[in-house]
Image (cartoon, grey):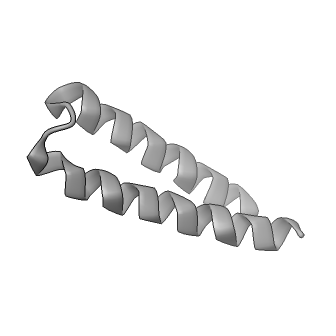
Amino acid sequence: MQRQLLELMDDVTATEFAIFERFGEAQETIDYFAQLQNARERADSYESRLHN
């Protein structure tokens, strides 16, 4: 499960980068970036709990 969470965080980062590369940081993409950041933070929190 810990590995899946790390992969999820990597996927979120890759998705965020792909959106930024294609569309930049525009008004239309800000919500997507916020949602991706939220998903990464939740996955990181769960991974930290599993690690401890």
The image shows residue 12 at horizontal and vertical percentages of 44, 49
Residue placed farthest to the front in the image?
27
Residue placed farthest to the right in the image?
52
Against 17, residue 32 (above or below) is: below
Look at the image and tell me whether residue 43 can be seen: yes
The image shows residue 30 at horizontal and vertical percentages of 22, 51
Between 14 and 23, the one lying in front of the other is: 23
Look at the image and tell me whether residue 1 can be seen: no
Left or right of 14, for residue 42: right
Residue plotted at (38% across, 56% down): 36
Against 9, residue 20 (above or below) is: above
Residue plotted at (55% across, 69% down): 42
| Quadrant holding the N terminus | bottom right
| Quadrant holding the C terminus | bottom right
Between 31 and 15, the one lying in front of the other is: 31
Against 38, residue 17 (above or below) is: above
The image shows residue 23 at horizontal and vertical percentages of 15, 32
Residue plotted at (77% across, 65% down): 48
Residue placed farthest to the top in the image?
21
Left or right of 48, for residue 44: left
Residue plotted at (46% across, 64% down): 39
- How many numbered circles does the render carry? 0
The image shows residue 33 at horizontal and vertical percentages of 31, 51
Left or right of 49, for residue 24: left
